Amino acid sequence: MDLNLKGKVALVTGGSHGIGRSVALALAEEGCNVAICARGDKRVEKTLTELKAKGVKAIGVLADVTISADVERVVKTIVDSWGTLHILVNNVGGGGRWGSEQVEQTSEVVWLDVYNKNALAAVRFTMRVIPLMRSQKWGRVVTITSIYGREGGGRPWFNMAKSAETSLMKTLAVNPDLARDAITFNSVAPGAIMIPNTGWEEQQKRNPRGFAKMVDRQFPLGRLGTPEEVASVVVFLCSERASLVNGASIAVDGGESRAF
C-alpha cells in the first residue's frame, strides 16, 4: 500500500527512544524527512544516523519540551531548514510510575510535572504547527496517549494527563475550520509496551518467572507489545489513506484494555 508520504516533513517529539524512535524510523521508511527532539544528545545522534541511513533528511534538536522557548526553537529549526511541517507526532511524555501508590502521599509537584510533560507539551507543539498546516491545507497531528487515557486504572496524575491529550485531539478534530483545511487530529493509546531501560524491563529482570506468569495471566496475547507495532498504526494515521480518520483514539494493546 502506497501511503503517499514521500517528501513529507515530520516531527516526532521524544523521537530518540522507544515508541518515538520507532515512529521516526517508520516515517523515514515511507520517505518522510524526519526531525526529532529529545534531551539526550547520544540517543539523538544515534537515531539521526539510523534515519539518514534510510536515504532521507534528518534533523535532531536537543530540547526540553516543558520550556516554551525550546519548543519554539524546535519548530523554527525545522521551518528554517525545510520550509514547512506536514506531520506532528506528540510522543514525548511519561510519569506513569511516578509518585506513590498511596496517592495522598504524592506531592502536587508530581501532578503538575506529569501534566506539563504530557498534556501541555502536546498543546505547545500543536498550537505552533497548526498555522503551518493551515497554510498548506494539509496536516496530521497524532498524539501518543495510553490506554489509561481511555479508562480507569493506573496512577491518577498520569490518567488525568493522558485523558487531557485525548480530549485535546478530539476537540480539535470536531472544529470545522481545521477539518476543512485537511488537518486531522488523532490519538494512539498503547498498552504495555516492552521498551529497553524502562519499568517493564526492570521488573522482568528482577523476577523473570513472576513476570512471565503475570504477563500470561493479564495479557490476552501472552506478551507485551513492541514499539514497532505502535509505529505502524501511527504511520497509517499520518497518511493520505487515513483522511477520514479524525478524532479517533485507537488502542494498540493486543486486547489488554477493557474500554470499548
Image (cartoon, rainbow, N blue to C red):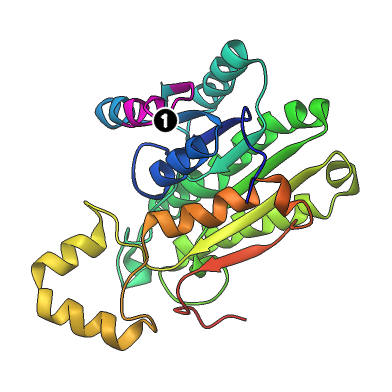
Residue beneath disc 1: 54
Q: Position of residue 82 (x, y in %)?
A: 61, 16
Mark 1 residue type: Lys
Give left or right: position of 252 versus 185.
left
Q: Residue at x 45, y 76 (%)?
A: 153
Q: Quadrant of residue 48?
A: top left
Compared with 54, 193 (above or below) is: below
Residue lying furthest front: 1
Q: What residue is at 53 percent from the left and 63 percent from the top?
A: 189
Q: Position of residue 253 (x, y in %)?
A: 46, 71
Residue 50 painted magenta: yes
In the image, the segment drawn in magenta is: 47-59
The image position of residue 211, as x and y in percent, is: 18, 77
Q: Residue at x 67, y 21 (%)?
A: 84
In the image, 148: left or right of 205?
A: right
Left/right placement of residue 206 relative to residue 108 reads left
Front in this rendered view, residue 26 or 62: 26
Quadrant position of residue 40: top left
Which residue appears at 61% of the width and 52% of the height?
A: 236
- Across and down, in percent, residue 91 comes to 49, 46
Q: Secondary structure at mark 1?
A: loop
